[in-house]
Image (spheres, helix red, strand yellow):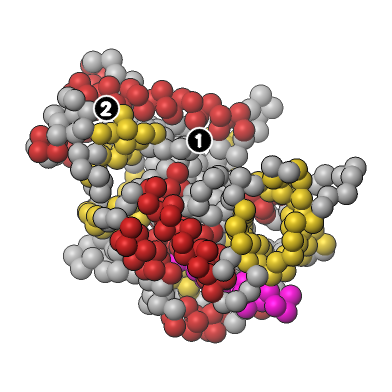
Amino acid sequence: MFTYSKSIPVYGDFDVVIVGSGSAGATATIAAARAGVRTLLIEKLPFLGGTSTAVLDTFYGFYTPGKTNRKVVGGVPDDLVAEMRSIGPVVERPNTFGAGTGITYHPDELKVAWERLVRRAGAHVLLHTTVQDVIRGGDRFEALVIATKTGLQLVRGRAFIDASGDADLCAYGGVPFELAGAEAPAQTLTTSFRVANVDMAQRKTVTKDRLHALMAEAATTLGYRLPRREGSDHITPVENMTATIMTRLNSFERNAAGAVINATDPDLLTRAEMDGREQALEYIRFLHDRVPGYGKARLATFGPQIGVRETRRVHGLYRLTKEDVLEARQFDDQIGLCGAPIEDHHDGDGTRWHYLPDDQCVGIPYRTLVPRGIDNVAVAGRCFSATHDAHASVRSMGQCMVMGHAAGVAASMIASRGGRFTDVDAARLRSTLRSQGAILE
């Protein structure tokens, strides 16, 4: 941690401080602020939503795959979907690979929906703000050093939620974590893009298998540089526009000293951002040349930032495992459910899928949100405590919202008395979540 040569002004004192406004952090903010505690949300981008608005356009995890299409996410996430529907159309559609019904939206409209719910809840928001360091006293975080347009400032808090995705807050504060890529391969990175002026009638004549065959042919015999050969495109709420998950970039490597680095490394991340846009243009060239319906199509937009699937996962009081997921285990302290398959975007041209038993779900234990070695910090979202394989299922944005909802409620329970996240009574937490519409069994 830094030694500062000058005093830093205090921005404010809050009961709950949340870092990262993605599906987990924004939901946590809404839940905590609705409970009446002083809540601050810190976000590095100029808008809320994280991956949900800067990378993707579809919520997965709300429904299970399988015959019954069972809904397993509720509460604050339902409020968000309702708010989106009040702004513009929302499309429910099957996932290309059978991972359950997705909820597809317009990312810019979702930015406004997140903002409305967060502001109505009474939370304070700081955009264009990054965390630079943690002030720690014993087993508690006392304050954060943040960088704003006016310079460094201090934010004091009673309870903190790390929803940064990368576990930045935990890393700065010395909380133990696993670096993705060090013990098991880290999932690849993806630059998303949307394409306008697509002839949808022609595009619908091409099956998934035919699209993948066209990709393989283009890459192996026609000179197109397509590292992933089974990418997908899908409809959006905008007529004649599709969105894609096609590009694939390596997310970890060894540096000159032999140490593993991943997308938390600024140099690797910078290269990936630029290489991802180049790669996206090659996929657009392929679509334009080889796929019916794309002959007159043009790039509409890149995602504002590259999609990162995993970087750091904290060591929590419980670590969710592959066996937990595939056996659909239930837990006494579970705060939500996940029916999404293990979706492992590994190096190479394919993706590994492992499905849960039909219509079944794994429970998400509250203990996976509570890091070891620190009293007043919880995590929510893709930095929760899980193995690489379990993480590849439960990282879906629907489940990130579930984790955020639980972390926000738990933080509100301990903030007023300066308690510990380990003090939260799981039965009381589960009862509160149920009363707010969450689905726990």
Residue occupying image coordinates x 65% and y 33%: 259
**Residue 409, magenta (yes or no):** yes
SS at badge 2: strand
Where residue 208 sits: x, y (%)?
18, 40
SS at badge 1: loop
Does residue 23 appear left or right of residue 339 in this picture? right
**Residue 135, magenta (yes or no):** no
The residue at which mark 2 appears reads as 298
Q: For the magenta stretch, what is the residue range?
A: 402-418
How many C-alpha atoms fall within 10 Å of the one at disc 1: few (<14), some, or many (≥20)? many
Name the amino acid type tagged 1: Ser
How many C-alpha atoms fall within 10 Å of the one at disc 2: few (<14), some, or many (≥20)? some
The residue at which mark 1 appears reads as 251
Q: Is residue 378 visible?
A: no
Q: CA distance from mark 1 to mark 2?
A: 28 Å
Does residue 301 appear left or right of residue 8 in this picture? left
